[in-house]
Amino acid sequence: MSSSLKHTLNQWYPNRDNTDWVLCTLYKTEGSSYRRTGAMMMFSADGQQLGLLSGGCLEGDIQRRAKAVIANQMATTITYDATDEDDLTFQLGIGCGGIVHILMQPISASNQYLALDKLRDILNQGGSGLYCQHIPSQQQMANGHLKPIENTQLWSIDRKSQLVTEDNQQWLHTQIFPEPHLLIVGGGYDARPLVSMANSLGWTTSIWDPRPANARKAYFPQVDNIISSSEQDLLAFSQQHQFAGIILMSHSVGIDAQALKILHQSPVSYFGLLGPEHRKQQVIEQSTIDIKKMNLPIAGPIGLNIGGDTPESIALAVLAEIHAVIGKRNGQSISGIVNYK
């Protein structure tokens, strides 16, 4: 199940008035932490938890503290210090060894839901915004509001957050972007785990395949959009949406070439073509495009080299590569334990 902010807000929204809720936001970290500044989760009076702030080690205690916030309807802050021998996190040996500061805010109609309903609408519409939350020095009324912002790139893996001071008040400003949108050309069997895994990350997925037998909703229950008709429909769809990545994997040189001709100048961070190098050259030649006019090189063969050959392992390798590219990482082993040449 996805723990993306969009997914969390979509789960919360239908139940926003059925029970009391608390928004918990990681507003400052020192040293190691599981999530980054700006990460959010929600707790309800009837025991629901939406999202994560740690690897699951702190949530039980945060939920206990959330009950007090629900009772007094005041915003407050809490700190978990895994470096302090007197702190709960140190005593229980939980956490990542750093210090995390968490803002807890009650959510209700009386405080306009902290503008979370508006934030949900913007994310569902593919937009972005600057979410501003007041950090109280003591228990105070909760305050959160949203400022729409314009961006040339409407998606990001990382949400950039910063603490700012305005009129002697401390605020957390978090840039909110929709999750990456992945366009897949080809609705065959091997595209199914790709869509499923991307969905679990909270990404938006769309498939184009002009063949009637492919890309059926029954085969892809989690896909957001299926474009199953003409090239003109694919062109129109590409003009109406912005993609983080495009993957050509129809197993047809002709279909891949058609899609490449339509999509080769799309402003994406990743453009990949399934198959070996010689097939990539065939697709490029049949598309008749000028490869030099593309915004970035075509990746192919695609995916990180993890040694997989099943549809599931290939999907994992491809998504990991895309994740690294749009997250501006090198895709290498963090510990260095994997170092095969």
Image (cartoon, rainbow, N blue to C red):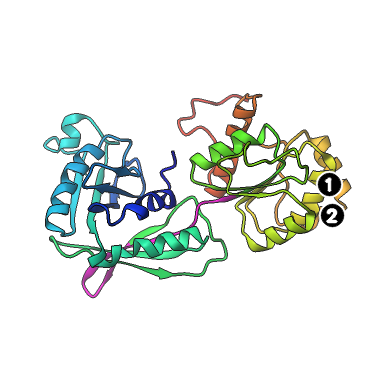
Q: Nearer the viewer, residue 182 or 71?
A: 71
Direction from residue 244 to residue 4 in the image, left or right? left
Closer to the camera, 119 or 129? 119
Residue wearing tag 2: 289
State yes or no: residue 178 in magenta: yes
Q: Is residue 249 above or below residue 155?
A: above
Q: Residues within 10 Å of mark 1 (few under 14, many from 20)?
A: some
Q: Position of residue 195 (x, y in %)?
A: 59, 39
Helix, strand or loop at disc 1?
helix
Sequence-first disc among 1 and 2: 1
Kindly check if marks 1 and 2 are in contact, taking CB atoms under 8 A apart as contact.
yes
Visible in this render: residue 264? no
Left or right of 53? Residue 213 is right
Q: Which residues are magenta?
A: 163-181
Residue at image point 29% right, 52% down: 25
Q: Indicate whether residue 59 is drawn in magenta.
A: no
Amino acid at the residue labelled 2: Ile
Residue drawn at 70 percent across, 53 percent down: 296
The picture quadrant where one finds residue 304 is top right
Q: Give coordinates of residue 76: x percent, y percent.
A: 17, 56
The N terminus - image quarter? top left
Mark 1–mark 2 distance (CA, rounded to whole Å): 7 Å
Per the image, label 2 sits on a secondary structure element best described as loop
**Residue 103 locus on image (x, y percent):** 24, 54
**Residue identified by numbered label 1:** 284
Q: Main secondary structure of the magenta part?
A: strand
State the image coordinates of residue 250 (x, y, percent, origin top left): 75, 39
Return the residue found at the far bottom. 167
